Amino acid sequence: DAKTTQPPSMDCAEGRAANLPCNHSTISGNEYVYWYRQIHSQGPQYIIHGLKNNETNEMASLIITEDRKSSTLILPHATLRDTAVYYCIVKVSNFGNEKLTFGTGTRLTIIP
Amino acid sequence: GAVVSQHPSWVICKSGTSVKIECRSLDFQATTMFWYRQFPKQSLMLMATSNEGSKATYEQGVEKDKFLINHASLTLSTLTVTSAHPEDSSFYICSAERLDVADTQYFGPGTRLTVL
């Protein structure tokens, strides 16, 4: 079973920041938070990951609460091409070989 | 970046034939690759974990004799669907794991299999 809870769907206006929440209240100390997205009929695309600290890259920012029980993915200026299903996944990073368990994700729709 | 390719991107075959799908990591080496399957309007389901030079580990309910996995090099894993039937029609996706990026998995574009 997936260890995360996400809202099934969200809308965001084009040009605005999209904030996607994720609850992972049972996360362990050695588990990372990974975010992926899947555009229709394509393989998932890696977005960002983090352990404790907030992270930012060219695609998004990841804000992790101090107790690590929840996180928020922020797309700063959403475009129509950001319409996709977004998956929040927790997984250990321990010399590899650990599987990703995909839940149902959040279907984000960017509105023109 | 971390690029993973799959070939073919789509395939149509007759019932009873075998189909081979290739997964390649183009700019990094991957000791571990994973194979997923996705049915319409469903999430990805892991089928098996493929380790270079050893036997694959299959998830419960996945027939290892039907879905043959070979991981002969650090950049190539193959999935062969043997004696395919219409119920095997699905979207097959592979991923390759980078140990130097917190074991992040990078996914291929997927292969759409249709069995007639």
Image (spheres, coloured by chain):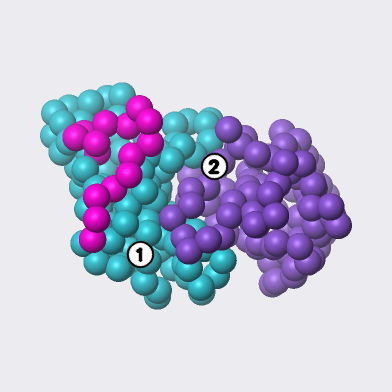
Chain colours: A purple, B cyan
* Placement of A38 over or under B104, stated as above or below: above
Disc 2 and disc 1 on one polypeptide chain = no
Q: Which mark is residue A101?
A: 2
Distance CA(mark 2)–CA(mark 1): 19 Å
In the picture, measured across the screen, residue B50 lies left or right of residue A51, that is left
**Is residue B59 something that shows in the picture?**
yes
Q: Which of B42 and B45 is in front in this view?
A: B45
Which amino acid does the dot numbered 2 rest on? Thr
Residue A33 position, x and y percent, is: 67, 55
Q: In this view, does B92 lie to the left or right of B63?
A: right
Q: How many marks?
A: 2
Q: Give the magenta-colored segment's residue range.
A: B53-67
Are the residues tagged 2 and 1 within 8 Å (C-beta)? no
Q: Is mark 1 on a helix, strand or loop?
A: loop
Residue nearest the viewer, comparing B10 with B47: B47
- Residue A83 appears in view: no
Q: Where is the N terminus of chain A found, in terms of image quarters? A: top right
Please check the rendered image and state whether residue A20 is part of the magenta-colored stretch, yes or no: no
Q: How crowded is mark 2: few (under 14 residues within 10 Å), some or many (20 or more)?
A: some
Identify the chain of the residue marked 2, using the numbered disc in the image: A
**Residue B34 in the image, given as x and y percentages of width and height:** 39, 51
Residue, disc 1: B31
